[in-house]
Image (cartoon, rainbow, N blue to C red):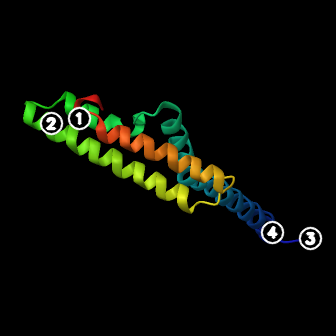
Amino acid sequence: MRDPVCLAVGVLVPVVLLGMMLWIVWMSGKAVDLIVGRKHRTLEEVLRTREVPAAWSERYRKRIRHATDAARTRELQKSAQTDYLRRLDRLVGYVRGTALVADEETREALFDDLAAIRAQWEARDLGEF
C-alpha cells in the first residue's frame, strides 16, 4: 500500500497548481479588461455622446455641488475642464499607438472626431460641464 501522505500530496499539489493557474488566467483577463476594455468603452462613449464621460465628471460634480462660494466653484470648473481635456488627449494618444484600430483610415477618422470634440469642449463655458 501507498503512504496516505504521499497520495494526498500527489493529488493535492496538482489540484492547487491547477487552481493557481486558473486564478492567474482569470486575473490576467480582468487586468486586460481594466486596461484596454475601459479605454475602448470610454472612447466609444465620448464618440457616441460627444460629452464628458460620467466616470470622469462624477468626482468634480460632487465637489462643485458642495462648493461654498462662486470663486471655489469657478476654480473647480476650470480644473475639471483641464482634466477632461488632458484625459481626451490621452485617449488620442492611445488611438495613435494601439494596434486595436482596424486600419489607418479608421484611425484618421477617430482623430478627426476627437479633434472636433476637443474643440467643442474647449469652447464650452465652464458651467456647461
**Is there CB contact under 8 Å for labels 3 and 2?**
no
**Is there CB contact under 8 Å for labels 1 and 2?**
yes
Among numbered discs 4 and 2, the one appearing first in the sequence: 4
Q: Which mark is residue 126?
A: 1
* Quadrant of the frame with the N terminus: bottom right
Q: Relative to 126, is 119 on the left or the right?
A: right
Q: Which mark is residue 1?
A: 3
Q: Which residue is mark 4?
A: 10
Residue at horizontal 34%, vertical 39%?
121
Residue 114 drawn at (x, y percent): 47, 45
Among numbered discs 1 and 4, the one appearing first in the sequence: 4
Among numbered discs 3 and 4, the one appearing first in the sequence: 3
What element does badge 3 sit on?
Answer: loop
Q: What is the three-letter code of the residue carrying label 4?
A: Gly
* Real-space Cα separation, disc 1 to disc 3, in angstroms: 80 Å
Q: Residues within 10 Å of mark 2 (few under 14, many from 20)?
A: some
* Real-space Cα separation, disc 1 to disc 2, in angstroms: 7 Å
Q: Which residue is mark 2?
A: 74
